[in-house]
Structures are given as structure tokens and as C-alpha cells.
Amino acid sequence: MTEQRPREITDVETLRAFAHPLRLRILNAVGLYGPLTATEVAERVDESPANCSWHLRQLAKYGFVAEAGGGTGRQRPWRMVTDGHRWGDGDESPELARAGDAAARVLLDLEYRKLWDWMAARRQEPAEWRDAGFFNQFIGWYTAEELAGLRDELRALFARHLDRLEDPTARPPGSRPVRLMAWGVPEVER
């Protein structure tokens, strides 16, 4: 089991680098199927290799991907840096808050699309996968401390198999990428 220690992102440029929709798709491809070259990424995200190469270098500049070793130019493979990311501690500058909101919006847009993709395709999946997939909804009463504790428990649970993202040999036979998403937000009175 790999313990995830999220990187605290505290600068606007890093968040802006992350908040780009194509870069998030590139991160998704490299995380799920990497290490990948720019050419292989381009095939997965339906963009040009030159464009993907440029975006991969930008992602590397801000610490989201790293060279995996071997190859040169567009033929060098890239791997995802799986340290997790956090931003938005509530005391950030207005500019950082806007960048953080934009990053969260792009990330959530991708996750919603993937949820709807699953909902549309799930009936064609083998029964074991169709029945294993889920989403839950729940409303409960928590203190701020309890909610923070729940957040930490979920992070630890999600990170339990983080090594499988970096090391394909750690993936058990029959496994496939599974998207995990959870949130716990206080009700906002309007």
C-alpha cells in the first residue's frame, strides 16, 4: 500500500497549468495507460503529437508528469506523478481562489463526463462489472472535525492501491481502471 501525501498547490501558474482541459485529458491518459510518448498520448486524446508534446512539457514544468526514461524528443515516454494535489485552504489570494475554482471545475467536468459515459454503457458490461459499479448519495449531520476525518479516511482508502497507477506489474489480472470520486460538502442555505 502506498501512502498518499498530497502536494499543496499554492501558486496560480501551477493551478492554471492543471486547469487546462486538454492537459487534464493528457494526465488521464498517461495515468491510466502510461508511460506514454507524445505520439501515443496524441492517439488517445485525438490531438496532434506536436501539441501533446508541448502540453506534456508544460505538465512536467509544473510537476504533474515526469520523464519515464528511454527515448528522445516526441518518442520519450512520460509517466504521471502520483502525489495527489490539494489547493484552496480558504486563506488564498483572490487570484489563487479563482484559479483553484477553475481547476476544480475542469476536473469535475471530466469526472461528470466519465460518470455519464458509464451510465450510458453499463448495461452492455459483463454482469460482474455492471453490478460492481456504483454511486452513492447520502446526507448526514457532521461537525467540521467529523467531516475532516471522513475526508482523511476517504483519501487513505482511495490511495490504498496507488502503486498500481505507477507500476503496471502491480495490477492484478482482470483489473481495469476504475474512477473513484467522493465529496462531502456542507449544505449551503440560500
Image (tube, helix red, strand yellow):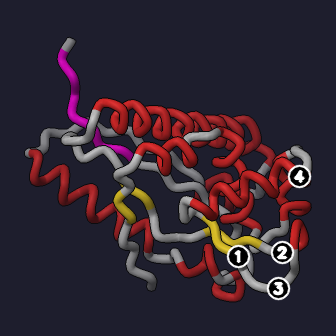
The Cα–Cα distance between marks 2 and 1, rounded to whole angstroms, is 7 Å
Secondary structure beneath dot 2 equals: loop
Determine whether label 2 and label 1 are within 8 Å by CB.
Answer: yes
| Residue type at the position of mark 3 | Gly
Estimate the x, y position of residue 5 in percent, counting from the top left. Answer: 36, 72
Estimate the x, y position of residue 181 in percent, counting from the top left. Answer: 47, 50
Task: Please provide the residue range marked out in magenta.
Answer: 183-189
The Cα–Cα distance between marks 4 and 3, rounded to whole angstroms, is 19 Å
Q: Is residue 187 magenta?
A: yes
Which residue bears the numbered disc 1? 67
Secondary structure beneath dot 4 equals: helix
Which residue bears the numbered disc 3? 70
The Cα–Cα distance between marks 1 and 3, rounded to whole angstroms, is 8 Å
Determine whether label 4 and label 2 are within 8 Å by CB.
Answer: no
Q: Is residue 114 above or below residue 164?
A: above
At 83% from the left edge and 74% from the top edge, which residue is drawn? Answer: 76
Which residue bears the numbered disc 4? 50
- N-terminal-most mark, 2 or 1: 1
User: Viewed as shown, does residue 155 lie left or right of 142?
Assistant: right
Q: Is residue 90 magenta?
A: no
Total numbered labels placed on residues in the image: 4
Determine whether label 2 and label 3 are within 8 Å by CB.
Answer: yes
Secondary structure beneath dot 3 equals: loop
Label at residue 20? none
Which residue bears the numbered disc 2? 76
| Residue type at the position of mark 4 | Ala
Estimate the x, y position of residue 14 in percent, counting from the top left. Answer: 49, 51
| Residue type at the position of mark 1 | Glu
At 70% from the left edge and 48% from the top edge, which residue is drawn? Answer: 25
Magenta segment main secondary structure = loop
The Cα–Cα distance between marks 4 and 2, rounded to whole angstroms, is 13 Å
**Pick the front one: 22 or 11:** 11
